[in-house]
Image: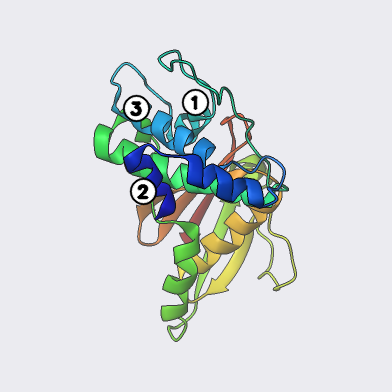
Amino acid sequence: MKLLKAAYTNNWESLNELASKEQLEPLELRPTEEAVVIARMKKLAKDPAVEPANALELVHMSYAEQEWERQSTIGDLVRPTPADRKAWAQYEKFIQLAVELLSKYRGIDGAWRSNRYDTVPTNDRSSMASMAAAAVKESFVARWNSAKDLNLAADLFEANEVTYGIDGLFECADIFDVIQRVVGDIESKGYVAMEECIDEKSYIIHIHDSEANEIDTVSITIN
């Protein structure tokens, strides 16, 4: 609420004073810096001359100072890694906002979404899955593009096993349980996971590195 009020009145002094009283973690953005990233993102999303490949690239563009800025005291901002807890949480929030902005100004079927990334936040899936906890468990298979030539599938995973990069079978009540498990492993390695919904029983997870390059994909289907 304080951030929105400052943006509406263009008065950032109170937020800067508040931020200066608190110890920021490495690469964590001050409220004014967050506001600048959001402002850049909105302007870029509205500009038809700007063609980001996807929401992640729009976020990366928004961390960089733009030519149309005048007398900016912010400049370029450094993107975080998962080790930078609070800064990474801000970064993930920006990705979600970028998807919403591009959907609004470019359309849900725009070129930016050529891979048709799903926009349901991963954190919401845990609650969705919990509502289906009483459902009969089904078997799902996760196949990594990098492992496709192996033509192998592991046994059912145990709770303490890591799934990253390994084709495997999951026995779950809902496909969102599988997505949450795989995405968690991907993000624990420092990568960004973006989900593409094919249908209710089929998803593709795209794995991107810190430079927004797609490095792998995972197909999740009912077995």
Residue 119 appears in view: yes
Residue drawn at x 73%, y 48% is 83
Q: Name the residue under label 3.
A: 43
Q: Which mark is nearer the camera, 2 or 1?
A: 2
Mark seen at residue 5: 2
Residue 193 appears in view: no
What is the spatial separation of the Cα atoms under label 2 and label 3, in whole angstroms?
19 Å
Query: At which x and y percent is residue 42?
Result: 35, 33
Query: How was the colour assigned to the protein in this rendering?
Result: rainbow
Q: Name the residue under label 1.
A: 61
Q: Which of marks 1 and 3 is nearer the N terminus?
A: 3
The image quarter containing residue 98 is top left
* Number of marks in picture: 3
Query: From the viewer's perspective, is 201 left or right of 177?
Result: left
Contact, mark 2 vs mark 3 (Cβ under 8 Å): no
Query: At which x and y percent is residue 203?
Result: 44, 53
Question: Callout 3: few (<14), some (14-19), or many (20+) C-alpha neighbours within 10 Å?
Answer: few
Q: Earlier in the sequence, mark 2 or mark 3?
A: 2
Q: Earlier in the sequence, mark 2 or mark 1?
A: 2
Residue drawn at x 51%, y 46% is 15
Question: Callout 1: few (<14), some (14-19), or many (20+) C-alpha neighbours within 10 Å?
Answer: some
Query: At which x and y percent is residue 123?
Result: 50, 62
Query: At which x and y percent is residue 39?
Result: 40, 33
- Viewer-side residue, 106 vs 15: 15
